[in-house]
Each structure stands twice: as C-alpha cells, then as structure tokens.
Amino acid sequence: QIYNEGLELEAKVPADIVIAQKAKLRDIRDIYRSVDLLDEEVELYGTSKAKVSLAVRDRLRENENGFYVCVAGINPTPLGEGKSTTTVGLTQALGAHLGKKVMACLRQPSQGPTFGIKGGAAGGGYSQVIPMEEFNLHLTGDIHAISAAHNLLAAAMDARILHEASQTDENLFDRLCPEKNGKRTFAPIMIRRLEKLGISKRDPSELTAEERKEFSRLDIDPDTITWNRVVDINDRALRSITIMQGSEESRIAEQYNCKYIQRSSQFDISVSSEIMAVLALSTSLKDMRERLGKMVVGYSRKGVPVDANDLGVAGALAVLMKDTINPNLMQTLEGQPVLVHAGPFANIAHGNSSIVADQVALKVVGKGGFVITEAGFGADIGFEKFCNIKCRASGLSPNCVVLVCTARALKMHGGGPAVKAGTPIPEVYETENLQLVKDGCCNLIKHIQNAGEFGVPVVVAINRRWHDTDEELKIIRQAALDAGAARAVVANHWAEGGYGAKDLAQAVIDVCEAGMSDFRLLYPDSLSIKEKIAKIATTIYGAKDVEYSEQANKQILRYESLGFGSLPVCVAKTHLSLSADPNLKGVPTGFVLPVREVRASVGAGFVYPIIGTMSTMPGLSTRPCFFDIDIDEDTGKIVGLM
C-alpha cells in the first residue's frame, strides 16, 4: 500500500517523473499544519512549496529535540546507490506506516548533475520528494542567489584591483568617500575596515595621508587570490580562463603597467561556493552576515587577509542572501514534510544540508519524533564532514547512522568490471555472483568501522534492486552484523514506497530508543592542519601517509600564522574510492594521499585541502541527461527529467 490517492504500486515501476506527476499533491498548507506550524511562520511559494521562518525554532525552543538520524552510504558506483531514495523511503515508512512524527532534511540539487549524468536528487521510484520538477530545478531560487552573491564578490574584487592600479592614493580615497554637500562620510561597512586597521577616527577629513592610503589600498596580490567565479552547470570550458581582456581593461593594463590585472582564473560550480557552505553552516541571519563578511578572497602583498568587509560588499551579499536563510518546505509522495535547504557537494564541499533546517525539524517533531537527514556520497566524505564540520558547528549529536549499500556497488568493490554512466551495465551486476559480493563487503565493513570512530551506531540499509538474489542479500546482511552494525535490513522502498522500508524504520526506532550513541568528534580543534588531515587520511581513508605540494605547504604555513589552524578541515576528494584514485575499489591500502592545494574558507569555518586532480568544475559527458529533457508544448509538463 502507498498512501497517495493518485498512486497504486505497479510491479513494473514507472519512470520517476511519471510517478511524481501521477501522484496527488497535497496543498503545502496541509503539510505544514500537519506538524503544527503557524500560518505566519510560513511564506508560500504557490501551493506546492514554501519557506519556513526561523521564528519556528524560537517559538519551540523549550521543546525537547527528536531523534537525529543521518543517512550515509558506501563508496558508490557513478550511478549512485540510493541514499536520497532511502532517506525519503525511511521518512515515508516512519510517518505513513508506523505513525511517527517525522521530517526529512535534504539538500537542494545542483543543475550540474541534473542536466549531466546522475540526474536529480529527489529520490526515486515510490520514494520521492514532490513536485520533483521543482525540487530538481529552481525551487525558490536559493542557488541562483548564491551564484549572484558569489559573482558580485568576484566582480568587486577584480574591479578594486583595477581601480587601485590606475588611480593615485588621493583619487582613490576621494572616490571611496566622495564629498557631498561639503562633507565626507564613511559608509557604515567602512567602519569595519577602520576597526581592522586600528583607526579610531570616524571623520574622513581627519585621516592623515598615510591613514588614507592604508584605508583605501587593499593591495591584493593576484597570485594569492582563491575566489573564482561560479555557475551552476557542468562546463569544462570554464576550468581555465583569462579575465580582464576587454579593450578598456587592456588599455589600462598597458597605460598603467599593470598587466597583472589580466590574470588566469577559473569557474567553479555554484554548489562548491563558500557562500553555499556559509548558508549551510549559519545559525541565523546575523550569523550569516558575519560569516559573509569574513570570507577571504586573497591576501595583500604584505600577507594580510582581504575579506568581503574590506571590499565593502558584505552587506550587499547579505541582501542577496536574506531570503535563503529560511528552509524550503516540500513533501514526500506519502505526505511527510521535507525541509530542502542548501546543496553543497560532498566531494568538493562539505556535503550536508543546513544546520537551521535540522534545528527547526528537531524542535517541530519533538520528543519521540524523528529527523532524517542525508550526508552526500560515501560516508568517508559525507558522514565524516557531517560529524567533524556540521555537528561541530551545531552542537547536535546523531542518534544513529543509516548506511546504504547495494549488491551492485559491492560487486564493483569485489572486483567487478567498471560501471560507467551512460553505458550498458555489465551482465555480472544483473545476475547472481556470490563471490563478488563477498569480496566487495570489505568496503561496507570499512564504513561501519569508520562510523564506530564517531561512536555512532550503524543500521545498514541494503537497498534492494530487482535482480538481487536472496543469497546475495543474506551475505551482505551477515557481513554487516559481523562487522558490528547494530542492525542490517533489506529495504525495497524504491519499488514499494514507505511500506518497503517498514523493517528499516523499525530498526532505526529500536536503535534510537535504545540510546546506543556515544557521539564524539574525530579530532580536537587544537591539532594542527596537517595533523587533522593525517587523522582523516589514515583513520577514515586508510592511507599510509600524506604528501603535500610546495604550494600546499606554503598555504598551510600562511593559514596557521594567521590563526586559521584551529578550523576543521573539509577534504575535497573523489567519492568513488576511499583513496584519491577513483579506480581503486574495495579497501585500498598502502597509498599516499596527495594534497595539491589548500584553501581557507574562513567565513564558512573550515580549511579546504584539494586532493590530487580533483576538479571544482565538473564537465559534461558525450551523452548527458539533457538529451531526454523537454517540455510538452500542449500541457506545459516537463518530460524526461530523472
């Protein structure tokens, strides 16, 4: 049975979009009223989605938190193993089939994979967030706001470099603080710059010539700039670009001997933006404004960090971002509320939805209720960052982790042929092969052990696919239990909705109510940057050692000298392997983790090592998803969206 009047479970599961469009959508007002949210706490975006005010959290602050469950996974195939589907199916099972008060918290998907290879992230089959078209595309515009804010900061930075190169100290100061009606004044944001410089004067006319120069000239060293532009599509052509090539900019570069303004740069995908991480890790509008101001774009020639406050643009960034701080409300196919908020990738960012969405949900469901959130990609990156970055910032502790695996992925880790998106699946993955499954369970076992490093009990969700055999699933279940999982359950929520995840949901209830979690962080703030990286590399990935490029060594020395060494680390690494090599499956040993460069996301609150050849701008394949996506010209319905 599936609790949606427009649906009946079909033996041959239709395409995701067919199910989603056939489903009966409840008015979003019914959804938020079902969990006792007030009309004044919700801003409607039509009848299918809304934004939830953080005032809810304040109103319910005396409520005891519900149980906090994170859904993670093993190292997946490029096709994904169904973490989002499991998150939704588990939520439907808890709410529609077991009568628990529950909310899911998911990330907003990027248009990169939506139009690339993987498709959207609304779940699949009979376990989806609906309307899946709105979920997977623009939603309420949060990612567009992030892109606009990020690129405004980039534009402000490069414009400032150009103007400083082509103007005298006097002209620069006069234009920054123009005289109006015979008087000069500082813009309010400029006070932060004065305070940073230790200048107590608040009347521009009182500044000495040296103070005016110090105030006006940021003197950014182009070689230290770490702030690229962003766009929310996969575009390999933008991995390397040269900027300031216009005729006016070329004339200025020649006339003022400042050809350094015409520098090499690149685009990153929007969901890797530090502003996305700021949104996900902020706890209030005020906190977000402060974090935006602290974002470092580069360093002066004297080695001083230059941030968004120095550039005078942090307030404008906050204005562009003001609506994004409120989580987006949607629904599952079976009518459970879902908060969709923030969307950082786990391989090139910290891979978790927002702190505020989790905080709101935990208060709304209250004691005995459940909040199901998801950590991106494999648990070696998504769940590690959930614990070491998100929980460190929020102070929240998970009651259990649901670790999703499939027989397909375990066969791959056991030595099966490569799985490539857009090409036929090799036959071995659709026929019984007990030995490959046995050999591949090592990857599952390693992730169970890793969860143990954080003191969090594991419920293994074996996400059943139609061609899996009972013997294969029996092997996986026993391996999980032998490795220390608290429970291991076969779930069929893709084909059966919440009903197919009832056993999984009961296992989660049992583990949470037993109070088995003894959550702890992997490392303290006091460790050095290299010690933190080594702890993650050797304990979580299984690396023998870590090696650093000359650039990375210099960057780490700079960050620690500036007091950034106490920040947690957010490793940018492939999700397809525990190692830095996506081709190494199972549990690689004896490898060295190569750190190419290290960035400091000071506003977000972490240091960002980039491993090996990891790219922050994905590319399109020969045959992306967009070939299948179109619109029905008569009805306006979207077709072909995955």
Image (tube, rainbow, N blue to C red):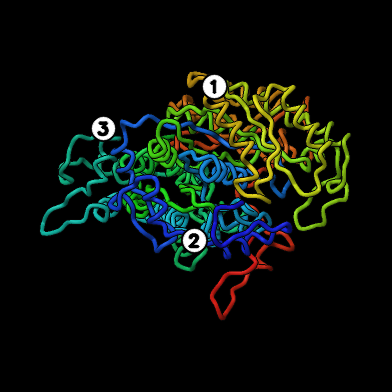
Label 2, label 1: how many angstroms apart (C-alpha)? 36 Å
Pick the residue in front: 83 or 11.
11
Pick the residue in front: 411 or 486.
486
Closer to the eye: label 1 or 3: 1
Return the disc, 3 or 2, that comes first in the chain's sequence.
2
Helix, strand or loop for disc 1 = loop
Residue 603 visible from this viewpoint:
no
The type of residue carrying mark 3 is: Gly
Closer to the eye: label 3 or 2: 2
Helix, strand or loop for disc 3 = loop
Q: Is residue 642 above or below residue 299?
A: below
Name of the residue lying farthest toward the bottom: 634
Label 1, label 3: how many angstroms apart (C-alpha)? 55 Å
Q: Position of residue 27 (x, y in %)?
A: 42, 60
Q: Report which residue position mark 2 lands on.
A: 25
Q: Report which residue position mark 1 lands on.
A: 514
Asked if labels 1 and 2 touch by Cβ distance under 8 angstroms, the answer is no
The type of residue carrying mark 2 is: Leu
Q: Is residue 445 above or below residue 430?
A: above
Q: Position of residue 609 (x, y in %)?
A: 58, 35
Q: Is residue 327 above or below residue 588?
A: below
Label 3, label 2: how many angstroms apart (C-alpha)? 58 Å
The type of residue carrying mark 1 is: Ala
Name of the residue lying farthest toward the left: 182
Q: Position of residue 348 (x, y in %)?
A: 59, 43
Q: Position of residue 449 (x, y in %)?
A: 67, 23
Residue at 68%, 68% (x, y): give it. Answer: 628
> Dot 2, how many residues are within 10 Å of its Cα: few (below 14), some (14-19), or many (20+)?
many
Residue 151 visible from this viewpoint:
yes
Residue at 57%, 39% (x, y): give it. Answer: 375
> Dot 3, how many residues are within 10 Å of its Cα: few (below 14), some (14-19), or many (20+)?
few
